[in-house]
Amino acid sequence: MRHVDARAAKGTVRPTSPPHASVPTAAVVELRQYTLHPRQRDVLIELFDRKFVETQEAVGMTVIGQFRDLDDPDRFVWLRGYPDMATRAAGLNAFYGGPTWMAHRDRANATMIDSDNVLLLEPASNATAISVGPRSTATSGDSLVIATIYSLRPESASSFPKLFDEIARPMLVGAGAAVLGEYVTSPHPNNFPRLPIREGERVFVVFSRFPGVAAHDAHRATLAGNRRWTGDVAERLGSNLRGAEETLRLAPTARSRLR
């Protein structure tokens, strides 16, 4: 969301559903990780949740989830979805050229060091898209969302989702994870270049939910004690990866749909 110019959108975008309604499944999703200046995360979250949620959804986008990274006090993570790439281009043009962003962009940008760590994703299959319901009006909650990012070897990108579902997903679920969605790198070029994305990578991303940190710790302990998981499964998954997977422990903000 940083350093976007003010060119207004040409054309119109259909409004989406009311903020407390369920929303359609997004065919295109951005996983956005922002590095912030020290002690600025709550400043950005307050502004974001108050000013940037309904105003983005009014121009065709879905703010799927907003999170605090529990392992980095200066990291804000969020998910933004679109029904298709055409809506992405039109919606981003409308929002970043619109009055709300223009009025608050300086304050938002002042909190950020970097906002370019962005993965453009699509569901690994029709059955693996995240489904989100009404936005909560709760002010707090203990749920924990885990995003696990696997950086894939190019030759493994097409086969890895099936392998994961066959050997890993059943064990994750058996150890207490609620798997919310599975995503792969979108093949589409970035059609809003003023907001950079990570390019030249192939990733597989799994989103899971737990009742809280303690439940996730117990889940990890269960898997660590399972010889099949630490042996055969780890070896077969690892042979397809460019390096170790990245795990994000994400605490939903008060207005996150995904929680």
Image (cartoon, rainbow, N blue to C red):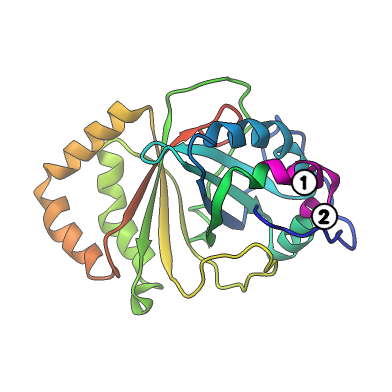
CA–CA distance in space, label 1 to label 2: 7 Å
Picture coordinates of residue 185 (x, y %)?
A: 49, 66
The residue lying toward the viewer, choosing from 107 and 128, is: 107
**Amino acid on which the number 1 mark rests in the picture:** Trp
What residue appears at the point 65 percent right and 47 percent down from the top-left corner? 109
Q: Is residue 175 left or right of residue 22?
A: left
Instruction: Write down the residue under mark 2.
Output: 97
**Amino acid on which the number 2 mark rests in the picture:** Gly
The residue lying toward the viewer, choosing from 48 and 162, is: 48
Label 2 Cα neighbours within 10 Å, binned few <14 / some 14-19 / many ≥20: some
Residue 54 versus residue 120 in the image, above or below: above
The residue lying toward the viewer, choosing from 177 and 41, is: 41
Region in magenta: 95-107
**Which residue occupies the extreme bottom position in the image?**
155
Label 2 sits on a secondary structure element that is: loop
What residue appears at the point 60 percent right and 32 percent down from the top-left corner? 43
Q: Is residue 199 left or right of residue 206?
A: right
Q: Which quarter of the figure has residue 115?
A: bottom right
